Amino acid sequence: MKDHVLVTGGAGYIGSHACKALKAAGFVPVTFDSLVTGWQDAVKFGPFEKGDLLDRARLDAVFAHYEPVAVMHFAALSQVGESMQEPGLYWRNNVLGSLNLVEAAVDAGCMNFVFSSTCATYGEHDNVVLDEETPQLPINAYGASKKAVEEILRNFGESHGLRHVIFRYFNVAGGDPEAEVGEHHRPETHLIPIMLEAIDGTRPALTIFGTDYDTPDGTCIRDYVHVCDLVDAHVLGVKWLQQGKRNRVFNLGTGSGFSVREVIEQSRAVTNRAVPYEEGPRRPGDCTKLVSGSVRAERELGWTPQRSTLDIMIEDAWRWHQTGHYEK
Ligand SMILES: NC(=O)c1ccc[n+]([C@@H]2O[C@H](COP(=O)([O-])OP(=O)(O)OC[C@H]3O[C@@H](n4cnc5c(N)ncnc54)[C@H](O)[C@@H]3O)[C@@H](O)[C@H]2O)c1
Ligand SMILES: O=c1ccn([C@@H]2O[C@H](COP(=O)(O)OP(=O)(O)O[C@H]3O[C@H](CO)[C@H](O)[C@H](O)[C@H]3O)[C@@H](O)[C@H]2O)c(=O)[nH]1
């Protein structure tokens, strides 16, 4: 019988790609999702269990039914701006929800746990190359909620032997090259999908948030990683835990940074269309430069990103943008 993996947030952008990768690797991905920001149409690669992390009885029933060998925990609210206006929402959903999940996993004897964290937990370290030892000083409730879940995992690792891998993502981009699933946030806040909507006229223009940063062209620099490479690291993480290894944090980024203007130029080249944009003020909370300075995932997990070049990420996102969509 194939091993089941419980994928919370499997109806979302990254979780749906993880389900496809898990299926390809011989696992059965079981999506657990409330659809608060996800899409039932995105659940294509295994069973769907609708439920909320805050519903402990529902979690217990799903663990008992599938007896998963591991959990991949993507389910979270992840809008920085919203987290500053409604911190309670983020602490309840992301932290209490994760605590429920961790306790349900431990009680069910499912001791392999892979968690989606973020480089937003590092906070403001402008112009510093970030590695896993960089102090975590989050500047918004979203980042604080993710850091708190990291602490929960460390505590349960010590107290109950829960084996965990924490991945701190940089900027996730691109989509399934076969366009079976893709990035679909409502509202969308991420640069590349917004840019593609501006290119095809479904929104008026992209606004560049700030042109006076201390960077070569004045715009912010980010480290973009392809969602398929990112989820491949998660599958490696599950296998690594199944080998009995445990409790490690990995940055997932490429180590290369691109400015907003460079992303615009690459989008123009890939789509062969003009990118309508205007220059606007800085967006509160944006760091100047966020680039990973770690090769730990490559060295220890054997992770080798295949599609994380800017042109491929934009090409894949553009293909999905032109052909794919979800309905509730
Ligand atoms: N997209 C990025 O660039 C990025 C960067 C860093 C970290 N992350 C993290 O990766 C994870 C996935 O992000 P995404 O972009 O795929 O987001 P997404 O919104 O597309 O997916 C999140 C999924 O979780 C579900 N969900 C949320 N709260 C839930 C709850 N209480 N119970 C059950 N389901 C719930 C949503 O319905 C949705 O399907 C998140 O944890 C996010 O914080 C994303
Ligand atoms: O309309 C837009 C949207 C974005 N940007 C700029 O493009 C860059 C990337 O912005 P995104 O919103 O795509 O991504 P962020 O870097 O703000 O945030 C993402 O990556 C973070 C870690 O870097 C967190 O994990 C967060 O959850 C995730 O959304 C930033 O400089 C931003 O100012 C624009 O200029 N215009």
Image (cartoon, grey):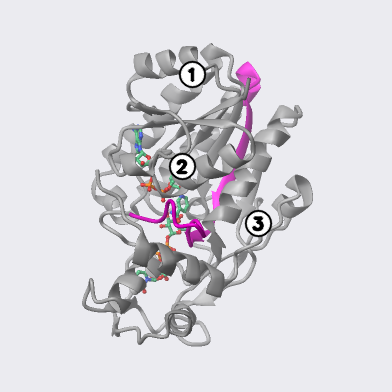
Numbered circle sitting on residue 103: 1
Quadrant location of the N terminus in the rendered image: top right
| Labelled pair 3, 2 in contact (Cβ < 8 Å) | no
Q: Is residue 56 above or below residue 221?
A: above
Q: Tell me if the residue at label 2 has its CB under 8 Å from ligand 1.
A: yes
Magenta-drawn segment: 157-184
Q: Is residue 209 above or below residue 47?
A: below
Percent of width and height locating residue 172: 49, 58
Indicate which disc, 1 or 3, sits on the residue closer to the N terminus: 1
Point out the frontmost of discs 2 and 1.
Answer: 1
Residue 169: say if magenta. yes
Give the residue at x 63% y 34%.
26
Indicate which disc, 3 or 2, sits on the residue closer to the N terminus: 3
Can residue 54 be spotted in the picture?
yes
Q: Could you say which is closer to the camera, residue 295 or residue 58?
A: 58
Tell me the quarter of the picture where residue 208 sits: bottom left
Can residue 281 be spotted in the picture?
no
Find numbered disc 2 in the image and state the secondary structure of the residue it sits on. helix
Find numbered disc 3 in the image and state the secondary structure of the residue it sits on. loop
- The residue to which callout 2 is attached is 146
Tell me the quarter of the picture where residue 44 sits: top left
Q: Residues within 10 Å of mark 1 (few under 14, many from 20)?
A: some
- The residue to which callout 3 is attached is 131
Q: Residues within 10 Å of mark 3 (few under 14, many from 20)?
A: some
Give the spatial CA distance, label 3 vs label 2. Answer: 17 Å
Q: Amino acid at mark 2?
A: Lys
Give the residue at x 45% y 24%.
101
Give the residue at x 68% y 42%.
236
Quadrant location of the C terminus in the rendered image: top left
